[in-house]
Amino acid sequence: MNGSLLTFLKGGVHPPESKELTEHLPIESMPLPATVEILLSQHFGAPCTPLVKKKDEVVEGDMIGEVKAGLGAGIHSSVTGKIKNIATSAHPISVSASSVVIQTDSEAGPREYTPCKWMDLSRDELLGRIKRAGIVGIGGAGFPTHVKLSPPPEAKVDTLIINGAECEPYLTTDHRVMLEHPDQVIEGAKILSIILGLKECHIGIEANKPDAIEALQKTAKESSNGFRILVDSLKVKYPQGSEKQLIESITGRRVPGFGLPFDVGVIVQNVGTTRAVYDAVVLEKPLYEKVITISGRSINRPANLLVRVGTKLSDIVSFLGGTKPELSKVLMGGPMMGFAVSTLDMPVTKTTSGVLFLTEEEIDIRPHGQCIRCGWCLDACPMGLSPNEIAIYVEAGRAEDTSQFGVFECFECGCCAFVCPAKRPLVQFIRLAKMKAKK
Amino acid sequence: MSESPLWTVSISPHVKSRESVEKIMWTVVACLLPPLILSVFIFGLQTLIITLISVISCVATEAISQKLLNRPITIRDGSAVITGLLMAYIIPPGVPYWIPILGAIMAIYVAKHLLGGIGFNIFNPALIGRAFLLASFPVAMTSAWLTPIRDAAVFKYMGTGIDAVSTATPLYVLKHYGMAAVLEKFGSLSTIYGDFFIGWRPGCIGETSALLLLIGGIYLLYKKYITWHIPISVIVSVGFFTWVFGGEKLFTGNPLLAVLSGGVILGAFFMATDYVTSPTQKTGKLIFGAGVGALTVLIRLKGGYPEGVCYAILLMNPLTPAFETWFKPKRFAPPKGAEK
């Protein structure tokens, strides 16, 4: 079995998976919070301009923010209620960002959506529905999906890959979505294929999710009608779900530095995004709720939760019975690439994949020492860079001279710092190098 | 959550592997202990005393150096212990007790901390310590050999110091009197292979037992703390060059004897593999090891000393930065125009 698993060639690490905390828990809907704080920038590109003002009444799914010019995606109200304020909220990366605060109307029932036939719709209409629903890549940086699906004409896209690798430890949202809604994932994959003019697509899943692989294979076979949907088992190795690594694992092609997947004829979409595309096209439902994993050994009740965008972490914590006293780090996202936060007064966005509550045992806060040149980071780096040398340059005050080492190809997967026996904060050094070096 | 929580906020990754510098170093220390225990049976209790003096002097020198240089004191990481063990292992068992103290100061203060501390030393500190001792005290360092004890009298050589000169190493005999003399002194070839493999021969404190060193070395390979490239290329290269040039005619040298005598196994697994002073990439490692082997044979056959592993490694050490420049990891797919 192992011989047939697809994988990328260079580097990679095997962090403890810790998925057993949540992988068997069915997706659970969280009751609506009293208020939501919806950030106006939840995607790669310009922030949205609010379309509502204080005291306006909104209905679940109404567009409340729109990008006036440039790259971006619209933002929708995730609840029915009244606009309480246009204010600023805490943000995991930019510290604070403008947001729309909505008071939930607890009387209002859920908005109903009815499935429609989409097969006869034109490509432009399919893309239009995706754009109107505000779909962005919810597995990663939040790149607007309708833009990603419209590559320049000279790019000959011949392969679509649905990313179900979910290689980050702890996270199990894609796993549960594939297991519980395989039909929607497959249907979404078909929509994406049609938009790209393809008759087949790959779904790549790490082999530690055999039930999801089986569910998708079964559904793909039953509802093939003219499409070839190939479910590929991938070797369990971080960062298998990184776009460039996944493309290499499945197609053997390597996206060149500073290049994009369509340069090698590939488009990658995450499983969650694919399901959101299904919602957008079949139900005409905007992206305003998502499944996130709440895990770690200091949350009282780990869960896979369906939450509304804008739900605050503090509301999630109280719904799940609070945290344990051992809590020593809170993360938005996975433990390899997620962001540590200092407050629970922070909302979930379209790209939040999980919130982790970790104990001191789970993290490592030992102070770092000097590099002993073991070379492990060189073996671990999937991009073939030399994190050890970059770090020494940065420590020596020569961060601006590091572009020769390819710092800008680093996507901060964290493999180097994970393996470093001297516990050196290599990713931090590299980020500093990126700020000071010239491209 | 009753009090205001103080959480750690730092940059990703938030989980890290369980390995650490301390774990690596103390594992190496453990792998180095069996040959020490055997050496007590072979040469008597004073090998243990010399080793202890060496280790304690190295650790003390490290603490004092770091104090003097205003650096954090890191003696708990075990690296000075390794230096102390390795340096003791490559000095003869009959040297006076003050010898390893001087070696430790040279190794740790000069060769390690004056160059920037762990990670920045150009040469292997233990080998610099020994090279310094050999240059400064050539008589003590080249003649204090002891005959292996066959009667379990572990106190036999205690405190006798340099007067206990009673034998010569196989490599010394081979260099000055030839193969026939080796056979006469140490028995038939098959006896020699057996005795030398287990460690029953004159030599430095910790270098004699190929068997116990191999067990430690294989454990380090199993733990992935070292890779096979350097040890194997050193051993193959010593064997190969000895076979070609080591006999009376070309291709008549005895590679097995060459590998089992002197410090080849100890050097190959525990010294040439030092992270700081050896290359990180496979190609670099293979060439580095081959160079160590070739220089060892060159020194043994043509140099002034019967053994050459120490100088061979010291000569290859400063080439490490060059190997690192020549052999880099293969980049995933660098942008066009920025190859390499």
Image (cartoon, coloured by chain):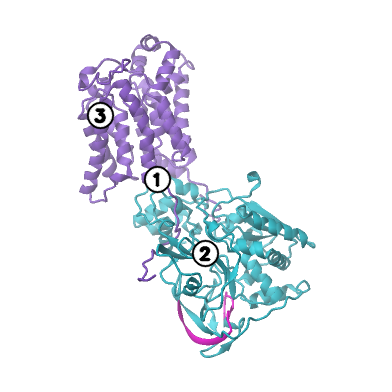
Chain colours: A cyan, B purple
Q: List the residue tagged with mark 3.
A: B50
How packed mark 2 is, by other alpha carbons closer than 10 Å (few <14, some 14-19, many 20 or more), is: many
Q: List the residue tagged with mark 2.
A: A302
Q: Give the residues drawn in magenta, as a range.
A: A66-89
Quarter of the view holding residue B279: top left
Pointer 2 with pointer 1, Cβ within 8 A: no
Residue flagged by tag 3: what amino acid is it?
Answer: Ile
Q: Kindly identify which chain the residue marked by label 2 belongs to.
A: A
Pointer 3 with pointer 2, Cβ within 8 A: no
Which SS class for mark 1?
loop
Which SS class for mark 2?
loop
Near-viewer residue (A328 or A423): A328
Q: Nearer the viewer, mark 3 or mark 2?
A: 2
Depicted A9 relative to depicted B167: above or below:
below
Residue flagged by tag 1: what amino acid is it?
Answer: Arg
Q: List the residue tagged with mark 1.
A: A373
Quarter of the view holding residue B211: top left
Is residue A274 at least partly visible in the picture?
A: yes
